[in-house]
Amino acid sequence: MSLIERIVTVISAKLSKLVGRAEDPRETLDYSYEKQLEMLQNVKRGVADVVTSKKRLELQAQKLEQGVVKLDSQAREAVQAGREDLARTALARKVAVQQQLQDLDQQTQALEAQQQKLVENERTLSTRIESFRSEKEVIKAQYSAAEAQVKIGEAATGIGDSMQNTGRAIERAREKTEEMEARGAAMDELIASGTLEDVTSGGKTELDRELEQIASQGQVDQELEKMKAEVGAGSSQKELEQ
């Protein structure tokens, strides 16, 4: 179960208890508003966590890029020294690091997409919460006015409390039901939008790894031959100049 799903479950459970025992629907509206603000804070923390993870991957990629440059330089030095075995080892490590860089790039792109989705959900949720806040205050004011009118009417006409209480209970139940249905629809949209995704799984099979190893070995051989040719060409040029 995702974080937002857990939040929705907790809010729904607490609201159900509150609706069942609340005497004043204004308290229910205020409680619902507070829970929505808490959910918004959780979404904001989710955005911050994704940004932090993406930055960590970017820093790791920078270190790997520096490693590629260093390994390439070491391979060239080994070829110049006639140590083909050392050159081959350095190039093999270089290819492996380049593959790690590709994997990091894919993970970074996935985190970027997740960040954009979370930011969009944050904007949508903020708009809905502000709209709910405005409507909540209107309903509370209307309820207070209606409550005062009923009390005045009772004092003036002497209508029995039992009949008035029955009417108010029905109205409160209707208002609470409509508000709960609206909140449920909003929560369903947020969950259905797929806010959180698992971007940590690589999904590679043993066959994939073997094919990558073959491709890496071929790349090592190609770079080694190219480097030997470059070193040989440099030596020939120096002999001609002498």
Image (cartoon, rainbow, N blue to C red):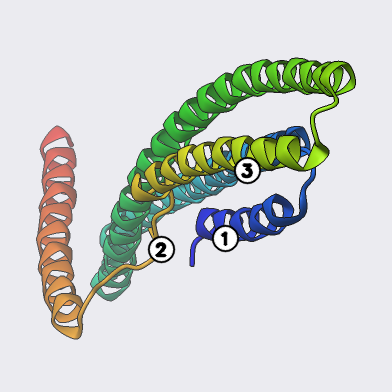
Name the residue type under label 1: Thr
**Percent x, y of residue 200:** 41, 63
From the image, tell me which residue sits under label 3: 39
Whether residue 218 is visible, yes or no, is yes
Do callouts 1 and 2 mark residues in contact (Cβ within 8 Å)?
A: no
The residue type indicated by label 3 comes to Met
Q: Residue at x 52, y 45 (%)?
A: 50
**Left or right: residue 57 compared with residue 214:** right
Marks 2 and 3 sit apart, C-alpha to C-alpha, by 24 Å
- Kindly identify which residue carries mark 2: 200
Residue 42 position by quadrant: top right
Query: Neighbour class for label 3 at 10 Å: few (<14), some, many (≥20)?
Result: some
Residue 141 pos. (x, y %): 73, 16
User: What residue is disc 1 on?
Assistant: 9
User: SS at mark 2?
Assistant: loop
Image spot of residue 208 (x, y percent)? 16, 75
* Whole-number angstrom distance, CA of label 1 to CA of label 2: 26 Å
Report helix, strand or loop for mark 1: helix
